[in-house]
Amino acid sequence: MTDHSTPITIAVDGYSSSGKSTMARRLAATIGYRYIDSGAMYRAVTLYALDHGMIAPDGTPDTDAITAALPDIHIDFEVQPDGSPQHTMLNGVDVESEIRRLRVSNAVSPVAAIPQVRRALVEKQKAFGAGGGIVMDGRDIGTVVFPDARLKIFVDASPETRAQRRFKELMEKGAAVSYEDVLANVVHRDKIDTTRADSPLRKAEDAVVLDNSHMTVEEQDAWLLNLFNKIISE
Ligand code: DC
């Protein structure tokens, strides 16, 4: 019998724009856990690398330069006083909107494939989750960061559904992008994320799969909360 007061660790993995961040963040808020968006950490390193000329115009990252800069890259999350989602901080500067731009989205997967970058960020992610009571989303959370997580979810949805969601989000922010470009970015990132040598995106054996292509956010919330309640009452 589990002690209900003991906070557990929840890992949510899945493809880009699968809605995993939304569901992870909303669950964390409902159950009073901390939420960490591990993708934001890879995006922050990528932004730093772009701003310091460490990524060639063809998108190839300068692995040595980025590795050498890792001790100078400090990433944190700042809770917002109005209760809105926390913001990603890079060396004390709020980069939340900057890291969501297509400029970063287009460059992030090769940076996230660098083993030294992964090692540094995984270490930090483990530290964030040390006491439990955390919901973290990403690509390797259930397989590498928290292989012993009590609850693991793997979120799936078709590339077209995911591109459509991302496109809608970007349009709402006033970005001048085409659906075709967004779809191409989603497909390209899937390929790099699933085929990289170090910690490729894959479902942990003990993860529960959710295909949310035809689910509303509310249906997703209910499904996840139900699963969480079941696990903690076991
Ligand atoms: O979830 P996202 O789209 O913000 O992730 C950005 C990139 O970082 C994406 O290319 C996958 C990579 N990533 C990763 O390799 N491992 C994680 N735990 C999270 C994200």
Image: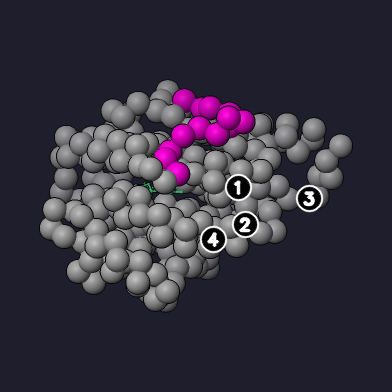
Q: Distance between the residues labelled 1 and 3?
A: 17 Å
Q: Which amino acid does label 4 sit on?
A: Glu
Tag 3 secondary structure:
loop
Placement of 98 over or under 196, stated as above or below = below
Whether label 4 touches label 2, CB < 8 Å: no
Q: What residue type is labelled 1?
A: Phe
Whether label 1 touches label 2, CB < 8 Å: yes
| First in residue order: circle 3 vs circle 2 | 3
- In terms of secondary structure, what is the magenta stretch mainly? loop
- The answer to whether residue 82 of the structure is visible from this angle is no
Whether label 3 touches label 2, CB < 8 Å: no
Q: Mark 1 points at which residue?
A: 146
Badge 1 crowding class, 10 Å Cα cut-off, few under 14, some 14 to 19, many 20 or more, is many
Q: Give the range drawn in magenta.
A: 199-211
Tag 4 secondary structure:
helix
Q: Is mark 4 within 8 Å of ligand 1?
A: no
Q: Name the residue under label 4.
A: 123
Residue at 45% x, 44% y is: 199
Q: Distance between the residues labelled 4 and 2?
A: 10 Å
Q: Distance between the residues labelled 3 and 4?
A: 23 Å
Tag 1 secondary structure:
loop
Q: Distance between the residues labelled 4 and 1?
A: 11 Å
| First in residue order: circle 4 vs circle 2 | 4
Q: Position of residue 75 (x, y in %)?
A: 45, 68
Q: Is mark 2 within 8 Å of ligand 1?
A: no
Residue 6 numbered tag: 3
Residue 118 numbered tag: none
| First in residue order: circle 1 vs circle 3 | 3
State which mark lies toward you, 3 or 4.
4
State which mark lies toward you, 3 or 2.
2
Q: Mark 2 points at which residue?
A: 129
